[in-house]
Image (cartoon, helix red, strand yellow):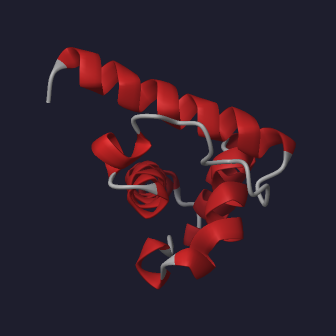
């Protein structure tokens, strides 16, 4: 993947998260994103990438929680508070593909 494609992927992620901040259930979240199909394989691929992002951040939070004596639930809730739009988007669209389900 070229740097240009990586930057396009990042712009798509930011665009979708910006739209989701207004309404994570909006049918327009994935519209008019010309490179979505090519770079992510469509909306499901983007949702998988976002779920991967969530899971990476959650894994780091869980490691940190273990060191600090926090519970897994506290770590999860902390991350959900830090990234409410990402969590809301994933929660709103897990029905599209059950493999997208994040922890």
Question: How far across and down, in percent of the image, does residue 71 sit?
Answer: 59, 68
In the foreground, 84 or 89: 89
Total labels: the figure holds: 0
Quadrant where the N terminus lies?
Answer: top left
Where residue 58 appears, as percent x and y from the top left, is: 47, 56
Left or right of residue 62, residue 77 in this image: right
Q: Is residue 3 left or right of residue 42?
A: left
Q: Position of residue 28 (x, y in %)?
A: 73, 49
Q: Residue placed at 72% from the left, 46% from the top?
A: 85
Where on the picture, by quarter, is residue 63?
bottom left
The residue at the point 42 percent across, 49 percent down is 53
Q: Is 17 left or right of 101, judged from the image as shown?
A: right
Looking at the image, which residue sits at the far left?
1
**Residue pictured at 84% horizontal, 49% vertical:** 23
Asked if 100 appears above or below 2 in the picture, the reply is below
Quarter of the rendering containing residue 87: bottom right
Image coordinates of residue 19 in percent, x first then y, are 74, 38
Residue 38 placement: quadrant: top left
Question: Residue at left 38%, top 52%?
Answer: 56
């Amino acid at each position: 993947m070229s740097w240009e494609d990586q930057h396009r992927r990042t712009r798509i992620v930011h665009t979708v998260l910006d739209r989701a901040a207004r309404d994570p259930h909006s049918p327009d979240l994935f519209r008019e994103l010309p490179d979505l199909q090519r770079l992510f394989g469509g909306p499901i691929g983007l949702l998988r990438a976002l779920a991967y992002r969530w899971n990476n951040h959650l894994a780091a939070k869980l490691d940190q929680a273990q060191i600090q004596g926090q519970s897994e639930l506290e770590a999860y809730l902390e991350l959900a508070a830090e990234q409410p739009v990402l969590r809301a988007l994933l929660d709103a669209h897990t029905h599209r593909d059950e493999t997208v389900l994040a922890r």
